[in-house]
Amino acid sequence: MDIVTNSTDPTHPVLTLDGRFDAFETDAFRTTIDQLLAAEATDITVDLRDVQFIDSSALAELVRAMKHCREGNGELYLAQLSDPVRVILELTRLDAAFEIVQAV
Amino acid sequence: MASVDHLSGEAITSLTGALVDANDRLLGLLELITNDPPTSLEAPQMVDAVLDRAASILDLDMVQIDGVEQHVWGRRPPNTSKGLWTTSLEVADSGLLNIAFMRGHRRFDTGDTKLLAAVAKLVTSAVATSRVHHATLAQEVLAREHSTAAQVAAAALPHEASIPTLPTLSFFARLLPARETGGDLFTWQQVDDSVWFAIGDVSGKGLPAAVLMSTAVSAIDASISRHHDLGPRNVVGAVDAWLHQRLSNAAMFVTLAIGEWNSRTQTLKIANAGHSPVVWCTQGTSTRVDATAPPIGVLEGCQTGHWTTGTNPGDVLVLATDGLTEQNNVAGAMFGEDRLDATVCTYAASADDANEIGERLLATVAAHGADCAQSDDRALLVLRFS
């Protein structure tokens, strides 16, 4: 999976993910999130339009990122959900836990 | 044999010196390539052993290595840079190793550079050997972790011999672990007139998931024992109270569906926190028992709803994990949610007991994933009411 970070606004960077988001990708995602939060970021948007598959390990990483943002009085926004991601979030009712937005 | 009569004494001395030097180099090279077996398989020690021997032939001051391995050998940095020879070699598909040999007091001549090239190959070989050793060690550690995780998982789950036996209910339970253990779980209990059952999936894989799965099963069993008179929703709440902080600290969650079937009132109640698929099949049609709250460990104070129905003979409830629905075939297509629902309905219509439905369903998923690795644990509970 590719992770592209746009930090035009360093307090609210946008991560664009592309590919399969599974247990093999969680370390890279966690490192990226932790580096952003250790810098200036308070809010983070994760653009999921190009994620073709997401598993429970990846969902747990999103939950972790959400909690860390909220601990700093920020928010993790999930944007432009692809169909596979939207289905999993609905099936697990995680859509009730995340802030989901239509556009980045 | 050529005559040396015409050479001056000085030339003969010089030539003799060169021949002795060449002979020393050959002996040194022999020493380099016929050394004792390494006492360590760590790259720095192996490289040092090569360079210690090479230094006695080439009078090296310092050797700097970077690229896939970073290391400095040297008694002292050279005062001048008269002798500097560099090379880059590939280390067994891992990347390049850049090596710089330094000698301060004189330049490297043609003979030196040929020897240095041989030493560079020995250094590269030492680094490659060490990397293979570490890769083998890592695989061994992973294999042991998988084995331990599988043992932890197997010990946590109830044995099939304890499956509830009632004249009006047939009950099937099976867990097929993947090569890398996931966190799939199930459990059950008979309490008075009720059969309680639960299925779930801890996020992640390997030993952490297996350990938390074991904790989750204990929490579910204890919560059913203590709170069964309050219904599944409160039992899920009790499990959440027990597990939320532990899961949250570990950046994990568990999907969980807990149900109670009362054999006297023929009533089924299910509370679902983030779990899928749960399929209810009655009179030839299937319905999903959807989650009404996120998985446990996500939001503190998990509040699910209750899904309730009366049961009739022939009705079937299937609770599975995503190892069934997400199994790929060789073309990369998942078994899928819709196919699971349709398959459950088809088998429910023709089978007389839960065992037949469960076995056929697992066989169908296995056939779909034939020639592909099992990507995740497959856990399955089937209840058929009669």
Image (cartoon, rainbow, N blue to C red):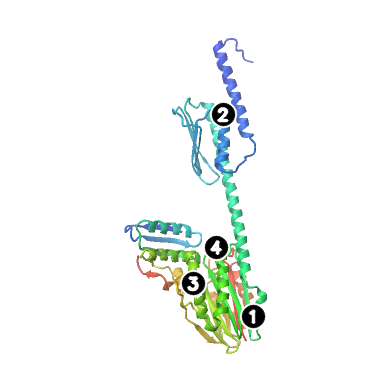
Nearer to me, B357 or B164: B164
Q: Please state the horizontal and vertical placement of residue B350, each as a whole percent of the image.
A: 62, 82
Residue B309, above or below B95: below
Outermost residue to the left: A9
Give whichever of discs 4 and 1 has the lower sequence position.
Answer: 1
Quadrant where the image shows the C terminus of chain B: bottom right
Q: Which mark is residue B56?
A: 2
Q: Which mark is residue B164?
A: 1
Badge 1 marks a residue whose secondary structure is: loop
Residue B3 visible in image: yes
Q: Mark 2 — on which chain does it sit?
A: B
Badge 3 marks a residue whose secondary structure is: loop
Disc 1 versus disc 2: distance between alpha carbons?
A: 78 Å
Give whichever of discs 1 and 3 has the lower sequence position.
Answer: 1
Badge 2 marks a residue whose secondary structure is: helix
Residue B375 visible in image: no
Residue denoted by label 3: B296
Give whichever of discs 4 and 3 has the lower sequence position.
Answer: 4
The amino acid type, in three-letter code, at marker 3 is: Ile
Give whichever of discs 2 and 3 has the lower sequence position.
Answer: 2
The amino acid type, in three-letter code, at marker 2 is: Ser
Give whichever of discs 1 and 2 has the lower sequence position.
Answer: 2
The amino acid type, in three-letter code, at marker 4 is: Pro
Locate residue A95 relative to residue B380 in the image: left or right: left
Residue A9, above or below B104: below
Pointer 2 with pointer 4, Cβ within 8 A: no
